[in-house]
Image: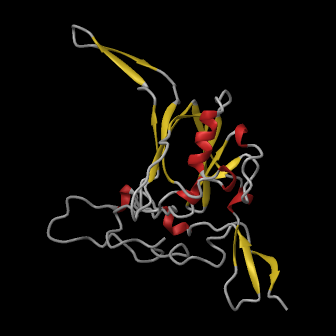
Amino acid sequence: MAFGTNRAAPQQRASFQTSGGIIIKFRHPYLSGQVSDASPVDEIDVSKSVRLNDTFFSAVPLQDSAVMEALVDGSTITITNHMLAGRATLNVLRTTGLVGSGDLIAALQLIIASKDSLGGTLTIIRMVNGKRIITVFYGVSVQNVPHLILAGNAIVPYAAVMLYSGFFEGVGADNLDEQTIWAVGNKNGISAKYRPYAIQAGQGDLFSASNVQSGIVGGVDDVDSPDGDIDNGATPAAGDGLDPVVVPSGVTWPS
């Protein structure tokens, strides 16, 4: 491991996550057979109708998870609950205006008009440090969606508000993390699961107590040795950042 200028200081972690490339999918049984534009039969890809440079999604609890009662003597009684129900707001743009081509606003209005008695799901997939973090909101119903908003030279977002009964979160299976990269000029493309270099994981204290001198006056004792300060962790080895070993994808240039 390579140490910083002050080897007693912690090495900070480097973390990456995508914004562009986030996948948002809304599913509802009433959409079965209604969506036909390159989507599963009951699913709409919401990612195609949200602005990148905007807060396009927020989810907040429907009620507080704890209530505290103060007593006369200053002590307290706290009541907690494990409610995961909440309210989600999607700021989406109206696109084609048709359910069949994946317009979310039109789809939500169709569900409202059809007297929803089933509920749907909302799935959000984010890429963080090479892994897919998947959040699924279930028991989703439409609370409020504007009927129509018009403006001059602008596309106005619709604040679609939904209620959900709960959510769960997990890490996608390894096969979902696989990416294919094919650089122009290379004969073959590569399919692999890419991972951050180990050096980016960060560390806490990079020293042991016995190596730190205190109470020194008039100078510094020679308590540090440069031997072994920098090992193979300083420079990523071949294959570091890939999990598992790179396997050619099998694709070749067209003949």
107 left or right of 203 in image: right
Q: How is the image coloured?
A: secondary structure
3 left or right of 168 in image: left
For image coordinates 62% across by 72% down, the residue present is 240
The outermost residue toward the right is 255
Quadrant hosting residue 208: bottom left
- Taking depth in this image into account, of 3 and 69 the one nearest to the observer is 69
For image coordinates 36% across by 62% down, the residue present is 211
- Taking depth in this image into account, of 208 and 187 the one nearest to the observer is 187
Residue 218: x and y in percent read 14, 70
Q: Is residue 146 visible?
A: yes
For image coordinates 57% across by 29% down, the residue present is 165
Residue 8: x and y in percent read 34, 63
- Taking depth in this image into account, of 33 and 129 the one nearest to the observer is 33
Quadrant hosting residue 135: top right
The outermost residue toward the top is 72
For image coordinates 71% across by 38% down, the residue present is 30
Residue 49: x and y in percent read 55, 57
Q: How many marks?
A: 0
Q: Is residue 129 above or below residue 234?
A: above
Q: Quadrant of the C terminus?
A: bottom right
- Taking depth in this image into account, of 134 and 204 the one nearest to the observer is 134
22 left or right of 176 in image: left
Q: Is residue 126 visible?
A: no
The outermost residue toward the left is 218
31 left or right of 21 in image: right
